[in-house]
Amino acid sequence: MDKLTKQLKRDAARIDVQVSDELDRRITASLQGITPQMPERPPMQRRPPVFWWASSLTGAAAAILLIVMLNSRTELHDTTIEPKQMSPVAVATAPTIQWKAESAMLTGPLQQELEDLQSDIKKAEEKVKRDIGL
């Protein structure tokens, strides 16, 4: 991480931005002249009690109808349980994909970065152990 931090600091130091005085005054004036406006909330519309009764009755009627339909479709058999004959179902087979997997080989810079990160983690662990007295 030390190299990354140094690189970021170097990149930040190379940034050169200049703002003209006129633009700076205009930005300041804009920021000071703006007051946040709260959006108006639309008034809440209350539904009449008839709506709630109608929706409740409709839901209850639909549930009862579903229960009746499901119960009317079931067949009552004798007390002896016989295994049902299952008809064969044609299942479409998907083509198989030949996966060619290879282990990734780390390139030199990635390997170096990994080693640097491992080193930073080890240093941090040692510092924490020192701080807590282990």
Image (spheres, rainbow, N blue to C red):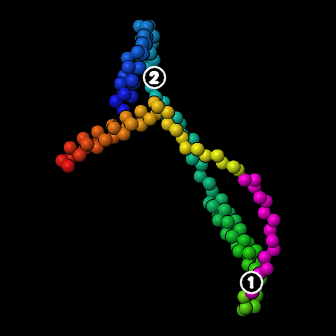
Residue type, mark 2 in image: Ile
Q: Residue furthest left?
A: 133
Q: Position of residue 46 (x, y in %)?
A: 59, 52
Q: Is residue 57 left or right of residue 36?
A: right
Q: Quadrant of the N terminus?
A: top left
Q: Which residue is denoted by mark 2 in the rendering?
A: 34
**Residue at position x 36%, y 39% from top?**
118
The residue carrying pointer 2 sits among few (fewer than 14), some (14 to 19) or many (20 or more) residues within 10 Å by Cα, namely: few
Element on which disc 1 rests: loop
Q: Which residue is denoted by mark 1 in the rendering?
A: 83
Q: Is residue 50 left or right of residue 133?
A: right
**Which of the 4 image quadrants contains residue 78?**
bottom right
In the depicted structure, whether residue 115 falls above or below residue 8:
below
Q: Position of residue 32 (x, y in %)?
A: 41, 20
Q: Start and end of the magenta stretch?
A: 82-96
The residue carrying pointer 1 sits among few (fewer than 14), some (14 to 19) or many (20 or more) residues within 10 Å by Cα, namely: few
Q: Position of residue 113 (x, y in %)?
A: 42, 33
**Which of the 4 image quadrants contains residue 80?**
bottom right
**Which of the 4 image quadrants contains residue 55?**
bottom right
Q: Earlier in the sequence, mark 2 or mark 1?
A: 2
**Residue at position x 57%, y 47% from top?**
44
Specify whether residue 99 is in view: yes
Specify whether residue 50 is in view: no
Residue type, mark 1 in image: Pro
Is residue 59 within the magenta segment? no
Element on which disc 2 rests: loop
**Residue at position x 64%, y 46% from top?**
100
Q: Position of residue 52 (x, y in %)?
A: 63, 61
**Marks 2 and 1, how far apart at CA:** 78 Å
Q: Residue furthest bottom?
A: 79
